[in-house]
Image (cartoon, helix red, strand yellow):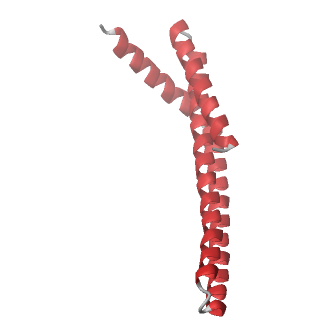
């Protein structure tokens, strides 16, 4: 688990708390702000998971290259060269995945931040609908 996953989870929980507090007090602003925090927390946590997976793939490439070199003692020259190629390829793919995860995570956070009004409106409608359903006992 990395920092982004932890911070995203905490941010999500804080947002849930604010949304619940706003629902209990009947105030729309804390509900909307809490919903925004929840969405931002989920996005940050997803970014952290993606980044962690990219790092795992990166490390798997190193292990795979080392295993290829170790097993290839018969054909050492071929195995080492193949292992180096796999190492370079895995490293390249790992970097690409890491960079892609960084880019997508940033894009998602920017989109959530840019569309605050829409996000807040959707959350407000959902909260109103949920409150309406719960109050109809």
Q: Position of residue 76 (x, y in %)?
A: 64, 90
Give the quarter of the image for residue 63: bottom right
Q: Position of residue 19 (x, y in %)?
A: 55, 19
- Residue at the limit of the structure toward the left, as seen here: 137
Q: Position of residue 46 (x, y in %)?
A: 57, 45
Q: Is residue 121 left or right of residue 3?
A: left
Determine whether 83 is above or below 122 in the image: below
Give the quarter of the image for residue 41: top right
Give the quarter of the image for residue 38: top right
Q: Residue at x 66, y 72 (%)?
A: 92
Give 65 or 15, whichever is nearer the viewer: 65
Q: Residue at x 64, y 81 (%)?
A: 69
Q: How many marks?
A: 0
Determine whether 2 is above or below 39 in the image: below
Q: Quadrant of the N terminus?
A: top right
Give 19 or 97, whichever is nearer the viewer: 97
Determine whether 30 is above or below 26 in the image: below
Q: Residue at x 66, y 92 (%)?
A: 77
Q: Quadrant of the C terminus?
A: top left
Q: Residue at x 66, y 55 (%)?
A: 103
């Amino acid at each position: 688990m990395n920092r982004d996953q932890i911070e995203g989870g905490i941010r999500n929980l804080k947002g849930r708390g604010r949304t619940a507090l706003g629902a209990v007090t009947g105030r729309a602003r804390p509900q909307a702000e809490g919903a925004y925090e929840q969405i931002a927390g989920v996005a940050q946590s997803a970014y952290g998971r993606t980044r962690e997976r990219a790092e795992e793939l990166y490390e798997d490439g190193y292990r795979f290259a080392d295993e290829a070199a170790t097993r290839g003692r018969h054909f050492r020259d071929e195995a080492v060269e193949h292992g180096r190629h796999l190492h370079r390829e895995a490293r390249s793919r790992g970097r690409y995945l890491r960079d892609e995860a960084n880019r997508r995570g940033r894009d998602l956070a920017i989109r959530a931040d840019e569309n605050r009004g829409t996000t807040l409106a959707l959350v407000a409608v959902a909260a109103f609908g949920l409150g309406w359903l719960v109050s109809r006992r």
